[in-house]
Image (cartoon, coloured by chain):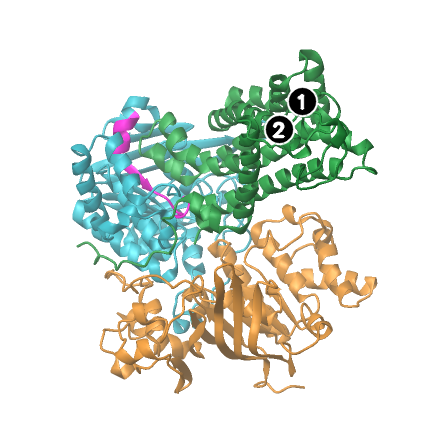
Amino acid sequence: MSQVNEPVLSVRDLRTVIHTATGDAEVVKGVSFDVARGETLALVGESGCGKSTTVLSVMDLHPRPTVEITGGQVVFEGVDLVKATEQQRRSVRGAGMAMVYQDPMTSLNPLMRVGDQIGEVVLAHGGSAEEARRRVGEVLEQVGIADPGRAARAYPHEFSGGMRQRVVIAMALAMRPRLLIADEPTTALDVTIQQQIIALVRQLQADNGMAVIWITHDLGVVARVADRIAIMYSGHIVEEGPSRRVFSRPEHPYTDGLIASIPRPTGSERPPLRLIPGSPPDPSHVFAGCPFVPRCPQAVDLCSEQLPPITERGSSSARCWVPPEKWTAPRSGGVSQQVAQ
Amino acid sequence: MSTILKVDDLTKDYPVRGSDRVVHAVKGVSFELKRGETLGIVGESGCGKSTTARMLVRLEEATGGRILLGDQDITAASRRELRDVRRRIQMVFQDPYASLNPRQPVGRMLDEVLKVHRLAEGAQGRQERVRELLSMVGLPATYASRYPHEMSGGQRQRIGIARALAVEPEILILDEPVSALDVSVQAEVMNLLTGLRDRLGLSYVFISHDLGMVRHISDRIAVMYLGRIVEWGPWQTVSDEPLHPYTQALQAAVPIADPDAEAHREVAPLRGEIPDPANPPLGCDFSPRCPLVQPVCRETEPELLELLPRHLAACHVAAGRRTERVSS
Amino acid sequence: MTAAVIEETPLPSGTSRRWVQRLWKNRNGKTGLVVLFVLVVAALAAAFGLLPYDPLEAHQKDALTGPSAEYLFGTDQFGRDVLSRLATGVLASLRIALLSVLMATLVGGLAGVAAGFFGGWVDRVAGRLADVVFAFPAILLALAIITALGRGWLITSVAIAVVYTPIFFRVARGPVLSVREADFVKAGRVLGYGSLRLLLKHVLPNVAAPIIIQIALALSWAILTESTLSFLGLGTQPPDPSLGLMVNEGRTLFTQAWWLLVMPSSAIVLAVVGLNLLGDGVRDVLDPRRRG
């Protein structure tokens, strides 16, 4: 029995390169994080920040040979998957850890009955037909589908978007994974359905102690689901810490800017939104110093010369040369103050 | 404030392919837009908000009802009249990648609008106006020679806005104008939109699924569900103290970017899903999902009534509470 | 107000170069261009009489000589120069291929664009016609036309054009259907643009790429079809040289004179592969999203 604090997944200095016609681009530039049992880590970032490539690398699902892991470790339950044999990796993929994608339509085979698709996962990992059949019923029930028997015989198109995402989650649960990676699982769904899916994942987590990595760009969803947050920007994790701490005392100007750019949810004042000038850089762009410099209101000369190291700041850590007490430009002051106003 | 646009009992039916059934996508929508006002329309997929938007600019023909721009009915405008209508009411699209012609540099794109509507004197005059339009949306004049794929999403959306402004319209229909943008870029476009509205005295119909953005920019908010407006009123009361149980559920479902606030907001998710618009429930469309449902809700369709000053809702339960309060 | 003018972001490099130059930089495109150049030079040489020998002149005592300094590609059973005949055959093939593809593009492409853009009955009628033509196996249809109309290079061109017209119809119609629904076309409507302006300035430029790619591919098929027809004795007639005819003649003498089969076959393969590569190259270059 593992201790609560012992990480299920431990990623160290992961580097992933995309080979393109115009050259190689390192899109994951030395990323490290842990996820413990029962914990939800939100991996937050905008398009092209490398968050999806990071988890695809972790899952060993990155498209080869265009995308290649060039360094680092992905330690899942004590085994480094980067160095592991293909057989070891395959036994982990889909069984030890499973993935839920953004688009529930394209992640299901439209020509195969839902029950067969879920059962196939069990069969592929050496389960018997009897086991597969039993498991299909169990997981469909777990994800709150009313008539599992009938649902198993239906095709994906017979379900609505929200129900389809439940089916996808059921499929991910088939082998009782210890880690669930959810890549923007609610982005394609309506907000009332999003609420249902979030509640479902939390319930499942409470029941079986799964660790969850939840990828999203929506800070609202982060606040709702995350125990801890890792903010990615241009291939780096620029800030990492407990959810409340990151929201109330952001240590990186990018985090601070993201929080400030959201409209206030309450109150009668509606000041102009604080914005981060410019747009996220192209993933292939190479920076001498900190990649956020061109958009950073707090930057000093050093920032464009040298990539800042990760520094511990209380329970958070950030990749920034300038600590918040030395910021010269106005800051959001964290979300609590913003809401209180 | 004078009314600039009045929508009256607007409906849109689509035939269902391979059957004689119809989908009622928009079912008797009425609202008015005052000069300088921003009306936010919020709702989930299939609620009819985008269909309504497209009917406002005649990209979609209305099945019934009227859209009055002054005393001109847009739904009945002839081809020639439509040209004038389109100088007064313009649209900004959701996807800044799809809404710009990939083979046209930005300068030529804007120049074309000016040429078609003869809006500036000669090539020189048009060039000057293009520069002016670019600076209005915060882009340097050098961007005139750029192709869409040479710009970021936020920059493209600025071009989409500049193109709509080229005809000097009075009304902009904004159909999910920031939904396709990165979080950090959304704020920039929102600020641009509020700034332009205040400076040019524009009126907006701002359509979005994002209650937070709608709340931020609107003067009044209309909430749509399954083709109907279910609530309509001042922005703050609709978003913060909604009358309709659907709006209440919607508001509760939108996560707040604050873990402490979220921790205190344990609300049970709304059950069920949006019904099939080709096969709507009897009575109130929301009744199968409504936590407050009463027998009457499953029988009669509630009317949109003014329950509070200038605050309308279509709900038997909310209306009942209102009567109780008045009589006691 | 006006939000502060945002800073100019750098342009991706290489966007302003002309597309022919970009084609040259593309590996497929370059190979295709080289092949096309060789074929055109051979055809021009044949057209302007710049060949080493008259392709029809028999040198009886040199019959069936292998490749040598005197006859680079050898001679055939009548002592005619294979190189000269090959060049003349390329001229004949290219002439037929270009003419037939031109006709197919004009008729099929225009019909496809109109059908896609206007929809309705225009689309239904044109679509049915295309289906009917498509229903016949290509070679059979060409054979039928030639049998009905007689032989000769013009009729061969027409026959091939008829076969490829529905392909161009479909290649043009599909993209027009999707571009017609694109937001930038809708934006144009909202801006008050007329249908003709939308079609010519906004839809056409965005469907040109697949049509141009199709032209390069169709050229290669047309060469192949012409060779097939000539091989079957229905295209170019002897004694005029043609690639297909030469393959047919060389086939029977292969054991004695390999070059009679290998040279024209290689020319066909070269032309087909080269034009296919050119098509791939053009596709890479014409898509603005693939540049740089």
Horizontal relation, residue A139 to residue B74: left or right:
right
**Residue B210 within the magenta-colored segment of the rendering:** no
Instruction: Check the residue under mark 2 and report the chain it is in.
Output: C
- The colour one sees for chain B in the rendered image is cyan
Residue A110 place in picture, x, y as percent: 66, 48
- Residue A341 in view in this figure: yes
Q: Looking at the picture, which amino acid does disc 2 mark?
A: Thr
Which quadrant holds the N terminus of chain A? bottom right
Q: CA distance from mark 1 to mark 2?
A: 8 Å
Q: Which residues are magenta?
A: B82-98
Quickly name the residue at label 2. Answer: C88
Residue at 47% in and 51% down: C25
Q: Classify residue A128 by image quadrant.
A: bottom right
Residue A18 place in picture, x, y as percent: 52, 65
Q: Looking at the picture, which amino acid does disc 1 mark?
A: Asp
Do tag 1 and tag 2 residues touch (Cβ < 8 Å)?
yes
Numbered tag placed on residue A250 in the rendering: none
Q: Residues within 10 Å of mark 2 (few under 14, many from 20)?
A: many
Say what secondary structure mark 1 lies in: loop
- The colour one sees for chain C in the rendered image is green
**Residue B83 within the magenta-colored segment of the rendering:** yes
Say what secondary structure mark 2 lies in: helix
In the foreground, B76 or A51:
A51
Q: Is residue A208 above or below residue C113?
A: below
Quickly name the residue at label 1. Answer: C240
